[in-house]
């Protein structure tokens, strides 16, 4: 395929574009406005180490989604969330460099993360042949998820071979702002605001929750609008940026205090977050919890 140039860029991701997201539920959180018109929705990671029930729930949920164009690669997650050198992460070819964890098999985790990048590139090169436009995570991984950054890097690596146009999402959290600032120069003009599909979002959230694999706050409220940015081809090296310089950009800030929660929901979501952190660090703890649940 001939490489596309910035002059070819339509105002928005066109109907029939491909959507590539890291985990089941990322597609509806970050790109609900285009899911019904996408040509294909590819979800990269499936199984989560130490949580077979959660992993199987993801498989059931993906099969039950009200979309006919979804495919899961079912790559096993490397369990690297929040393992980069935040708040100033070091970038690598496969995503973000991982810090050493005293209570984690860091070498094994880092090796799995690198291996996942190779698997992603191989799988995506086959599945994105013929695509003209691909929507994926932004270079800072929305709220700084190492897997999201890795998926972006893999799509970018495959684009160099296949020549499709890349669009990235408009979401960011305070954690990822420094990383975002490094990449703003690479973004073209934003698309017109697109209305999020809240009805579809509610339906897909219900399916994920029924299968015990919804990973976001239960009472999350979708913003009214979202944008997508084309990644500029041949953007060159990053220009010098002073610490106080900010490029004008339309972004949806991820702030969990936007989410209306009852006190019991706040406690429940907080405990769930703690559980995920423990399971990521100690996979055997996840198997222990699931053993109790199945008794």
Image (tube, grey):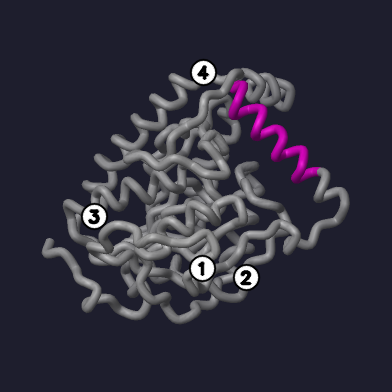
Q: Quadrant of the C terminus?
A: top right
Mark 3 lies on residue = 159
Q: Which residue is at a point 38% across and 51% down the rendered structure image? A: 152
> Quick check: 257 above or below 78?
below
**Local secondary structure at mark 1:** loop
Q: Residues within 10 Å of mark 2 (few under 14, many from 20)?
A: some
Q: Is residue 275 magenta?
A: yes
Which of the two labelled residues, at mark 1 and mark 2, occupies the earlier sequence position?
A: 2
Q: Quadrant of the N terminus?
A: bottom left
Q: Which residue is at a point 35% across and 68% down the rendered structure image? A: 230
Q: CA distance from mark 4 to mark 3?
A: 33 Å
**Local secondary structure at mark 4:** loop
> Quick check: 216 above or below 203?
above
Q: Nearer the viewer, residue 50 or 140?
A: 140
The image quadrant that residue 187 belongs to is: bottom left
Mark 4 lies on residue = 105
Mark 2 lies on residue = 223
Q: Which mark is residue 246?
A: 1
Q: Residues within 10 Å of mark 3 (few under 14, many from 20)?
A: many
Q: Nearer the viewer, residue 170 or 220?
A: 170
Nearer the viewer's eye, disc 3 or disc 1?
1
Q: Is mark 3 in CB contact (under 8 Å) with mark 1?
A: no
């Amino acid at each position: 395929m001939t490489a596309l140039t910035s002059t070819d860029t339509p105002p928005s991701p066109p109907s029939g574009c491909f959507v590539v997201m890291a985990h089941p539920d990322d597609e509806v959180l970050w790109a609900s406005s285009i899911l019904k018109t996408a040509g294909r929705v590819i979800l990269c990671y499936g199984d989560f180490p130490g949580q077979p029930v959660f992993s199987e729930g993801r498989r059931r949920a993906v099969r039950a989604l009200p979309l006919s164009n979804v495919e899961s690669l079912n790559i096993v997650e490397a369990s690297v969330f929040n393992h980069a050198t935040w708040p100033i992460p070091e970038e690598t070819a496969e995503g973000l460099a991982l810090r050493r964890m005293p209570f984690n098999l860091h070498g094994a985790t880092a090796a799995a993360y690198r291996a996942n990048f190779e698997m992603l590139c191989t799988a995506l090169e086959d599945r994105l042949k013929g695509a003209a436009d691909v929507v994926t995570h932004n270079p800072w991984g929305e709220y700084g998820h190492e897997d999201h950054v890795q998926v972006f890097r893999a799509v970018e690596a495959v684009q160099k071979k296949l020549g499709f146009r890349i669009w990235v999402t408009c979401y960011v959290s305070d954690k990822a702002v420094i990383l975002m600032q490094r990449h703003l120069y690479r973004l073209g003009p934003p698309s017109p605001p697109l209305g999020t599909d809240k009805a579809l979002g509610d339906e897909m959230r219900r399916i994920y929750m029924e299968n015990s694999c919804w990973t976001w706050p239960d009472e999350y409220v979708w913003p009214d609008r979202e944008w997508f940015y084309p990644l500029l081809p041949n953007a060159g090296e990053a220009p010098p940026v002073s610490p106080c310089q900010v490029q004008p950009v339309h972004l949806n800030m991820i702030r969990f205090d936007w989410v209306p929660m009852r006190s019991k929901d706040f406690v429940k979501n907080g405990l769930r977050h703690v559980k995920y952190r423990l399971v990521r660090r100690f996979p055997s703890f996840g198997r222990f919890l699931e053993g109790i649940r199945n008794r």
